Image (cartoon, rainbow, N blue to C red):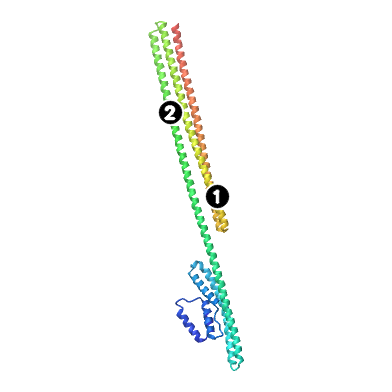
Amino acid sequence: MPGILAQILLPGQRRHLLRSRARHAKLSPPPPAIRADGILAEEMSKQGPHFPLLAPWERNANSVLKSHLLQAKEMPPDASVNRADQLEDRLWIHEKKAATLAEQAFRMKEEIADSLRDMQSKGAAEQVARQVLEEHIRKITAIVRQLNRDIVVLQEQIIARDNVNLGNNAVVKNLEMQHISSLGDLRGRIARCDASIARLSADLKSTYEGIQNLSNEQKSNKEILETRIKDTENQFISRIEFCMAQHDAKMKMTQESGTHQLQLFDSKVKKTADDLKAQIDVLQMWVEKEQKRTVMEFLQKTEQMSSFLKNRMESSEKALEDKYNKLSMKLQKMNDTQKMNSGSQSAKQTEEKLNTRIGKIEKRLWDEMQNMREETNSGFTAIHESLCSLRQIMETKVKIETTQLQKQIRQVKMMAQPIWRDSQG
């Protein structure tokens, strides 16, 4: 565009224009469209009184375009590269159109100059020249106005695109902040769920240790009872043996004595037998009481532990269900807001990722809860089975011991009967 204007101007004016360009090139050269408009206005004012200057609204449009171009220079390079390319393409098209129109005007000017040289002697030549010059000036002003209108339209389009891009950037930033906050909430909730699961596992460990301690106490009590029963059996056998030895010695020493001594001996044997029966009964009662007491204590402790575990599991399940319901409500609200704000593909992808991650977390929590339930149920069944087996063992042992004692008493009676018969005979 400036080269075409330099062709339109006279040789002296071309030199002056080139010198002014060389002086001001280092400072701040204005945009090519605005320079072309200014040079056209100056040249039209220099040609004569018939060349009108630019209108005020055209000058305002040029100043607005200049300010917008300066703002486009201040914008970041990443955001303004495509817009600058588009603007350069459109300005190049407008420059091309203006160049063609300026060439037409230059040709018309040369034709007018030639016709004026031929018609200088005539009086009607001035009127024709004025009419042709007026048409030439009208065409040039129409070209300049059309260029200014195109520049204003381009400026409005650029402003609208900038506003749209700014709005899109703000919406994307808001979505990113919302997704980051939602991910932080989910991470905190997952950490709290892990902490509650760790607490439950610690409680289960403590209860298992308590059950082990109870089983150890029961084993120690059982060993103590067995040792005591063995001690009583040994004492009873030693006592019977001692009595039998005394009885044999006395029978050998006092065979020739009378029935009075035999009656006394019989009475002593009966007393010792009664004493032994009483001691055996007392021992049986004490063993049964100790067994019942230990079994009752063990059952009470196991029931307390089972009730405590059930309450704890129910409370933890309720807490987890409440947290899951709250989380699902918040996610649903987030999904509604995201659907109302924008239906872009990135939001859908983030929603799908969140839904898949939440489904995985739910599945893992439910699997852990089911595993904990199965472990508690298996522990309770094992405890009940061990209790039943202990009861059966204790009952069988008591029965065996009672039968053994009864057999020993019968043997003593059978051994004492011939002695009694001999004494009576």
- Residue 380 in the image: state x and y as whole percent: 51, 35
Identify which residue, 396 or 379, lies in the foreground.
379
For the residue marked with disc 2, what is the amino acid? Asn
- Residue 233 in the image: state x and y as whole percent: 42, 21
Identify which residue, 372 or 42, lies in the foreground.
42
Q: Is residue 43 above or below residue 285?
A: below
**Which corner quadrant holds the C terminus?**
top left
Residue in the image at 48% along x and 82% along y: 18
Residue in the image at 41% along x and 12% along y: 268
User: Is residue 372 at all visible to an observer of this figure?
Assistant: no
For the residue marked with disc 1, what is the amino acid? Met
Question: Distance between the Cα atoms at labels 2 and 1?
Answer: 57 Å
- Element type where label 2 sits in the image: helix
Residue marked by disc 1 = 329
Q: Is residue 229 above or below residue 99?
A: above
Q: Which of label 2 and label 1 is nearer to you?
A: 1
- Residue 416 in the image: state x and y as whole percent: 44, 12
Residue marked by disc 2 = 221
- Residue 42 in the image: state x and y as whole percent: 52, 82
User: Is residue 285 at all visible to an observer of this figure?
Assistant: yes
